[in-house]
Image (spheres, rainbow, N blue to C red):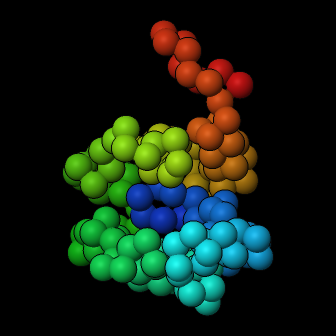
Amino acid sequence: MKDKKDLTAPCGLDCFNCQLYTDNLTDSLAELFHTKMGIPKEEIACKGCRKQDGKHFHLPEGCATLDCVKAKGVELCCDCNDFPCAFLAPTADQAAKYPHNMKVFNLCRIKKVGIERWIEEEAGEIRKKYFNGKFIVGKGQAD
């Protein structure tokens, strides 16, 4: 459980469920990133933002959200008095491809049910529904 807590990004992303997380990365996905984007294979696997100080090939400068959390001395953005802030604002740009619009929802669930329950019962389901669910106006998400 502790490992998954450490693999929960301060912004609410579940690094432990990410396809680029070192334990989840497949040879075929690594080959695809290498071939399509020219990224050296040894740079593709991620150990989680906390363990890599927010730096990865897709964030070469690091993560401003992680820097903010460290500066404020909180573990998660939902522990901050300014939650939610502009760092967590959803965008339509690439929303179907990246899980960043799940952040506020994840943080609200963590705050409500606790990180342990969220890790064990909800994080994977939230991610699956985000990428595979259907949105119905006035009803929200459908399976």
Horizontal and vertical percent position of residue 142 = 65, 21
x 45%, y 50%: residue:
100
For the residue pair 118 and 40, the one nearer the viewer reads as 40
Q: Residue furthest top?
A: 138
Q: Residue furthest right?
A: 27
Q: Quadrant of residue 132?
A: top right
Image position of 107 (left or right of 3): left
Horizontal and vertical percent position of residue 56 = 46, 79
In the rendered picture of this protein, how many numbered marks are placed on residues? 0
Horizontal and vertical percent position of residue 13 = 51, 57
Horizontal and vertical percent position of residue 81 = 24, 52
x 27%, y 69%: residue:
64
Residue 124 visible at all: yes
For the residue pair 39 and 102, the one nearer the viewer reads as 39
x 45%, y 43%: residue:
95
For the residue pair 78 and 131, the one nearer the viewer reads as 131
Image position of 63 (left or right of 124): left
Q: Quadrant of residue 87?
A: bottom left
Residue 106 visible at all: no
Quadrant where the image shows the N terminus: bottom right
Quadrant where the image shows the C terminus: top right
x 77%, y 76%: residue:
27
